[in-house]
Structures are given as structure tokens and as C-alpha cells.
């Protein structure tokens, strides 16, 4: 990296920086090298680290520590719920005849690929899957949801917040409706956790997925909430770790880091207000100072840090690269699919045109983003957009057409 260049990070929905608290705690956690399953002295320290992390995390989401399963992240948690429930209903002991008959799964049309592709996998295994449409405002088609929900529905999976637009879904209401027909409810809370307070008890969900690298902890870590009384087959068969629910020697370092990061979330409600003030300021200035910009789902309840913009006539990838040269990290779609020139499937599913999706930019600020950085970013964006639009016009490709 160029040492004189200053870097600014506006891509917190892709991943967050590892917090100073986590970085400082890592050497001590790594020194607890024993196997947490060992009953001798070497196992005690890692066991305590894992126990403490489980308690902090459970308290944070209002769960019981035994309802937390540590995983390698959001993708594994999502896979575990979907494949694990499908398998459990087919092969698990003590599964009632009613549950064995349930072969219908539903999710929103804008889920993360770790849900979408797993649903496709279940379909290939014989499940019936419905995707609940989402409109331009990011709202779920409740009529579709209710009319497709039935006594054959095994599970409904709807994310708490969308990674690209930040739109929030009515999880409590959806879970209640799913429960009314005896179906279970899962929410992918990967983007919500660390940005807004979250209470699984109040939402009354059966399963919820979380990822460490979205709340200032390390990558390859996460957890799954499984409400007491619910069962899913283990994705990883092996030892008796996580009470037989996830085989493999525990990742003490990663789990300890999750605990340290979760401790900082006690201030999440205040941080959310600060983020929203800064995000709203940023959007207001962009809308006032750059022509032909719209905020996708701007009127809908959203995460406080996310802004998904359509800048008419400017290619998202080109904008991203131009801003990168100036030290600003942004995204055009989900980072998980970057390198893929196709427009974002989420934006297309919301009914945006291919051109609109290709002209989109996702900005996601974080706890360390400053007003000065936002001001600097807006100036950089104005220059980039003006230059690219002038270039387009020079090539006879007026963005107004
Ligand atoms: C909504 C959502 N779910 C799941 C994931 C996957 O999480 P992980 O990277 O921990 O597997 C992501 C990551 O971008 C996400 O945004």
C-alpha cells in the first residue's frame, strides 16, 4: 500500500474491521492452547473462554447459553438450519407424523446465497420451495406469504435485514404467522446483529444465524441460535462438541474473539442512533448535490448504516474502481459475489431494471466512520460521477436517454 494515501472504509456490510478490543485480547486467548474437551488442566482455560463467550452472546440476544451453537459463520449457520431441519424431519428419532409430512419451505426472494442455494439443494432433494416476492420498496409480499403458508410448511426463513439495501423485515409478525400453522421460523440475522438491538425471545424465532466478521470480530466465526425444544441434524458429524450439535474441536480463538466483540455491543442502541444521523446526513447531501440519484428503499425501515444508491447513467463497477483509486472502499452489490459482472440478484428481485442495478452503489458506514470522512467521500463521489457522466456524453451515450 502507498504509505501517503489515506484509506476510508464504506463497506461494513461486506465485513467490519477487527476491533481494537478483539485484537488486544487475541494473544491471551491464543495462549489457551488446550483442547476444551480435555478434563485435565490444559482444557480448563479454553473451556472457560468458550463458556464466558457463550454467556455474553446469549445475554446479548436474550437467549439461554445452551441455545447457542458456535459455527464457522453465517453461511454454516444458515446451512445447518435448512439442511439440518430437512434431514431431521426425514430421519430424526421421535419426529411426529405431522412433521414428517411437512416438506414445504419458504424464504424471501432476496436472501443471501447461503440461504438461496441451500433452498435449491433442498429442492433437488425433493422439497417444495417458494420464494416470497419483494417489491421495489423492499417490502415482502405478505399476501403471497400467507396464501402459500400451510400445514405442510416445515420452515420459513426470512432475513432480519437485507445486506444490500439494509431493509428490515417484520420478523415478529412473520414468525407468529408461521407458528400459527405449526411451521418453524428462521431468521438470518447476520446483518442486523451489531447494528441494531436484537431480542430472539421477543421475536419468538426458532433459529437465528450470526457471523462474527459483521460485528467487528474475526472471519470464519459465528453462531446459531436454536430455541430450546427445537432440533436439527448436525451438519458436521464427529465428536460430541456443542452438545452433539456440531462436531469438531472448538475454535477457541474465534469463539473467544466473538465473546470480546459481543461485550462491546452493550452500546449498540446508542451507536445505531449515531450511525443513522451520519447516514441520513450523507444521503441528504448526495441527493441535494448530485443530480439523478435515488435511494433504493429509501422510505422503508432500514439498517441505520446502509445506503443503496442508483446513480443514473454511471456504471457501478467503474464508480467503485474510481473511488478505490482515491482510497474509498464501497460496493456495488454483495461483496460475496464481487468479480461477478452480473447485476445484483437482490436488486433485480426487487424489480429494479438491469440498468438501474448496474448503476447502483452500496455505502455501509461503521462505528468508526467520521463526519470528515463522509464529507470527503461526498466530494470524491461528486467528482467521479461528473467525470463519468461527461465521458458518457462524449461518447454519445447520454444518461438522460
Ligand atoms: C445476510 C448475510 N447472511 C449470511 C452471510 C454469510 O456470512 P459468512 O460470511 O459468515 O459465512 C452474509 C455475508 O455477507 C450476509 O450478508
Image: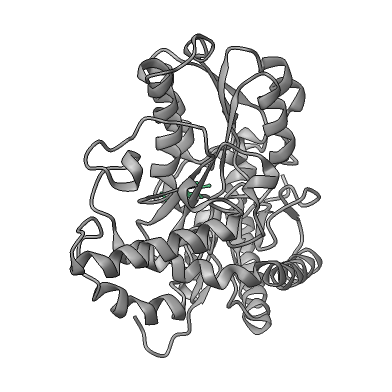
Horizontal placement of 374 versus 332: left or right? Answer: right
Q: Residue at x 28, y 55 (%)?
A: 250
Q: Nearer the viewer, residue 384 or 366?
A: 366
x%, y% of residue 312? 68, 52
For the question of whether residue 161 can be seen, the reply is no
Vertical order, 214 against 63 (above or below): below
Task: Name the residue located 55 percent from the left edge and 73 percent from the top edge.
Answer: 264
Please tell me which residue lies in front, 64 or 204: 64
Q: What is the quadrant of the C terminus in the image?
A: top right
Q: Residue at x 76, y 56 (%)?
A: 292
Q: Please state if 242 lies on the left or on the right of 288 as rendered.
A: left
Residue appearing at x 57%, y 53% in the figure? 191
Q: Position of residue 230 (x, y in %)?
A: 50, 32
Q: Quadrant of residue 392?
A: bottom right
Residue 384 at x, y = what percent? 59, 69
Q: Quadrant of residue 126?
A: top left
Q: Check the image and report above or below for 62 versus 281.
A: above
Residue at the bottom extreme, as displayed: 4
Q: Quadrant of the N terminus?
A: bottom left
Q: Is residue 303 visible?
A: yes
Q: What coloring was used for the rendering?
A: one colour
Q: Residue furthest front?
A: 40
**Vertical arrangement, residue 58 with respect to residue 134, above or below:** below
Q: Position of residue 124 (x, y in %)?
A: 38, 17
Amino acid at each position: 500500500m502507498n504509505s501517503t494515501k489515506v484509506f476510508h472504509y464504506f463497506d461494513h456490510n461486506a465485513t467490519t474491521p477487527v476491533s481494537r478490543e478483539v485484537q488486544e485480547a487475541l494473544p491471551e486467548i491464543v495462549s489457551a492452547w488446550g483442547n476444551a474437551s480435555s478434563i485435565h488442566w490444559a482444557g480448563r482455560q479454553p473451556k472457560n473462554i468458550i463458556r464466558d463467550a457463550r454467556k455474553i452472546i446469549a445475554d446479548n440476544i436474550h437467549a439461554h447459553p445452551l441455545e447457542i451453537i458456535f459455527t464457522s459463520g453465517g453461511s454454516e449457520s444458515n446451512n445447518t438450519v435448512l439442511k439440518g431441519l430437512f434431514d431431521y424431519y426425514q430421519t430424526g428419532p421421535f419426529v411426529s407424523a405431522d412433521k414428517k409430512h411437512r416438506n414445504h419451505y419458504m424464504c424471501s426472494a432476496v436472501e443471501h446465497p447461503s440461504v438461496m442455494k441451500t433452498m435449491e439443494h433442498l429442492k433437488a432433494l425433493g422439497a417444495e420451495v417458494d420464494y416470497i416476492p419483494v417489491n421495489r420498496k423492499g417490502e415482502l409480499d405478505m399476501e403471497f406469504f400467507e396464501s402459500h403458508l400451510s400445514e405442510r410448511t416445515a420452515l420459513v426463513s426470512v432475513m432480519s435485514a437485507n445486506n444490500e439495501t439494509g431493509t428490515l423485515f417484520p420478523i415478529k409478525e412473520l414468525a407468529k404467522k408461521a407458528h400459527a400453522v405449526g411451521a418453524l421460523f428462521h431468521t438470518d440475522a447476520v446483518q442486523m446483529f451489531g447494528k441494531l438491538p436484537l431480542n430472539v425471545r421477543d421475536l419468538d424465532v426458532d433459529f437465528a444465524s450470526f457471523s462474527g466478521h459483521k460485528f467487528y470480530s474475526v472471519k470464519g466465526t459465528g453462531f446459531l441460535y436454536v430455541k430450546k425444544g427445537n432440533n436439527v441434524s448436525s451438519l458436521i458429524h464427529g465428536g460430541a462438541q456443542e452438545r452433539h450439535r456440531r462436531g469438531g474441536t472448538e475454535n477457541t480463538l474465534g469463539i473467544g474473539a466473538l465473546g470480546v466483540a459481543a461485550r462491546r455491543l452493550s452500546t449498540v442502541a446508542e451507536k445505531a442512533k449515531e450511525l443513522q444521523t451520519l447516514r441520513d446526513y450523507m444521503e441528504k447531501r448526495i441527493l441535494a448535490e448530485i443530480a439523478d440519484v435515488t435511494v433504493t428503499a429509501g422510505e422503508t425501515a432500514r439498517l441505520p448504516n446502509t445506503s443503496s444508491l442508483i446513480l443514473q447513467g454511471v456504471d457501478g463497477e467503474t464508480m467503485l474502481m474510481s473511488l478505490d483509486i482515491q482510497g474509498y472502499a464501497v460496493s456495488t452489490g454483495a461483496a460475496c459475489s464481487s468479480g461477478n459482472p452480473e447485476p445484483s440478484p437482490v436488486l433485480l428481485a426487487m424489480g429494479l431494471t438491469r440498468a438501474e442495478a448496474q448503476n447502483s452503489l452500496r455505502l455501509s458506514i461503521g462505528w468508526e466512520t467520521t463526519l470528515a470522512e463522509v464529507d470527503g467521500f461526498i466530494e470524491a463521489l461528486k467528482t467521479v460521477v461528473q467525470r463519468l457522466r461527461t465521458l458518457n456524453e462524449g461518447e454519445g451515450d447520454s444518461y438522460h436517454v
